[in-house]
Amino acid sequence: MTALLKMMKEYSSLAPQKAIRNKDKHDENHVRNLFTQMLAGKGFILIDDQHRGFIASLIITNIWCPDVYELHVLAWLVKSEYKGTTLSGRLWKEFDRIAKDMIEDGRIDIVYSSILASSGFVDFNKRGYSLSSATFYRE
């Protein structure tokens, strides 16, 4: 869990929002609790064997439809020195395989994936996903 917490700190340091990059606002116990929930079945975490990247996802119910279960990517990070390698794609393919299995098993109804604005463009349409919304922020 320590390696995962370190990578989550790195992920938050890349956020475009100042409040999220502010280390004084980080709550390691909160993040540890989220990870524990994911590992206990309320989502899942993929991390490569050498701790170079991860995808963390959480299952929640839809705000309007409590019987609709959604899998959300909360964080997707590949350490900067491994960008441009196949690591990100391999993590994504495994994430997508698990997500499809979860849909087929009736465990979830919808998968949502997003990336940080600073990560560059990923064409999710080519990966079989449709645009749901765009998120904007103001500080």
Image: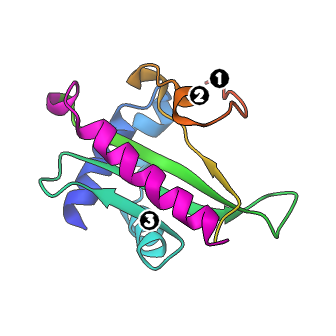
Q: Give the residues drawn in magenta, as a range.
A: 81-106
Front residue of this view, candidates 90 and 43: 90
Q: Does 5 appear above or below 39?
A: above
Q: Which residue is mark 2?
A: 125
Percent from the top left, x then y, of residue 108?
66, 65
Cβ–Cβ under 8 Å for marks 2 and 1: no
Is residue 86 at least partly visible in the picture?
yes
Q: Label 3 sits on what residue type?
A: Phe
Label disc, if present, on residue 50 of the rendered structure: none
Residue identified by numbered label 1: 138
- Residue that sits furthest to the right in the current view: 64
First-in-chain label (3 vs 2): 3
Q: Position of residue 51 (x, y in %)?
A: 17, 52
Which quadrant would the C terminus be assigned to in this image?
Answer: top right
Q: Is residue 119 magenta?
A: no
Residue at the spot 64% in from the left edge and 26% down from the top edge: 137
Within 10 Å of disc 1 (Cα), the crowding (few <14, some 14-19, many 20+) is few
Q: Residue at x 38, y 61 (%)?
A: 45
Mainly helix, strand or loop, the magenta region?
A: helix
Q: Considering only vertical position in the picture, is 22 above or below 32?
A: above
Distance, label 3 to label 2, CA atoms, is 23 Å
Give the tally of numbered discs.
Answer: 3
Using the image as rendered, state which of residue 97 and residue 42 is in the foreground: 97
Q: Say which quadrant the N terminus sits in.
A: bottom left
Nearer to me, 8 or 77: 77
Residue type pointed to by label 1 = Arg
**Tag 3–tag 1 contact (CB < 8 Å):** no
User: What element does badge 3 sit on?
Assistant: strand
- Ranked by sequence position, the earlier of labels 2 and 1 is 2
Q: Is residue 82 magenta?
A: yes
Q: Position of residue 72 (x, y in %)?
A: 58, 52
The disc at residue 44 is: 3
